[in-house]
Image (cartoon, helix red, strand yellow):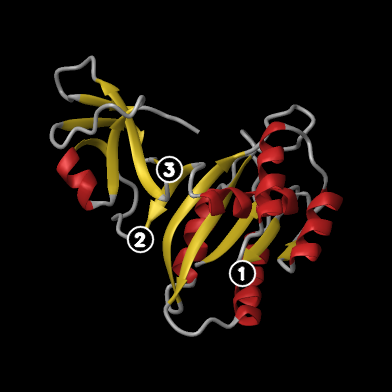
Amino acid sequence: MILVGIDDTDMPGTPGTNKLAMQIAADLMDRFRCVRIVRHQLCADPAIPCTSQNGSAALHLEPRVEPDPPALIERLRARMRSWYVPGSDPGLCIALTVPPQVTDFAKRAQREIVTQAEARHLAIECGMHLEGLGGTEGGVIGALAAVGLSQTGDDGRIVAMDIWPGDVTGIIEIERLHQLGVIVRSLDGSIEPSSGRVDLVKKLRPNFRGGKAVLFVQPAQSPIADWTALKRN
């Protein structure tokens, strides 16, 4: 699996990082299967510039052919530069392996302010590709953090999977969610309903837990569904 982290790619009123990640996945279909795209929440300190909630994204890529890292880097650069919005500070990270110290850095980035210098030094130390592609290049922090958090298999919300037919919305049968690779589970983990209807409220956004897509639910207070999806970062 190749992990690609991106961050700080947008400005208010422009398509967000998740949309860019989906476009990248489409661009790379000829050589990579994008298994999933995961959004990771980082520290929400007022001192940290962000468009809304300071989230970054990671693409989980499975090569269809022998990977060519330099060619992949060039394709990612080209797409991100074409997407660039003045005022944004995009960063890009590519990792074939993720050492524990990168995950440690990523978890710190969820709790406290970390610096570009730390991110860049760590990437060099670990032999990982990390670069800024505009503005202050502050997105290198979130790009590296996205890769570190995704490596755990236990953080973030899944915004897309290759077996989903685009965005999934509304009320959906649990059997259909299973077909889409999603486990349905109560928040305390005591119940995994095998049938019934789930009100997704907005869009299908299961959590990435134990390397799987897990949609946490609670009993619905409505006659049109049995369960209501819960938003958990």
The residue drawn where x is 75% and y is 47% is: 87
Q: Quadrant of residue 110?
A: top right
Residue at mark 1 to residue at mark 2: CA–CA distance = 19 Å
Sequence-wise, which precedes: disc 3 or disc 1?
1
Mark 3 and mark 2: span between their CA atoms? 17 Å
162 with respect to 97 (left or right): left
To which residue does mark 2 refer? Answer: 162
* Amino acid at circle 3: Arg
What residue sits right under mark 3 in the picture? 209
The residue nearer to you, when weighing 74 against 127, is 127
- Of 44 and 82, the residue lying toward us: 44
* Up-down relation of residue 119 to residue 208 (above or below): below
Query: Which of the two marks, 3 or 1, is nearer to us in this view?
Result: 3
Other residues around mark 3 within 10 Å, as few (<14) / some (14–19) / many (≥20): some
Q: Which residue is mark 1?
A: 76
Q: CA distance from mark 3 to mark 1?
A: 27 Å
Give percent across and percent down for residue 13.
59, 41
Q: For mark 2, does the 10 Å Cα neighbourhood hold few (<14), some (14 to 19), or many (20 or more) residues?
A: some
The spot of residue 161 in percent (x, y) is: 37, 55
**Residue located at (35% from left, 60% from top):** 162
Viewer-side label of 1, 2: 2
Type of the residue with mark 1: Leu
Amino acid type at circle 2 is Asp
Tell me the mark number nearer the camera, choosing from 3 and 2.
3
Left or right: 9 with respect to 112?
left
Q: Does label 3 or label 2 sit earlier along the sequence?
A: 2
Q: Is residue 65 left or right of residue 182?
A: right
Image x and y of residue 113, in percent: 78, 35
Determine if residue 8 is in view.
no
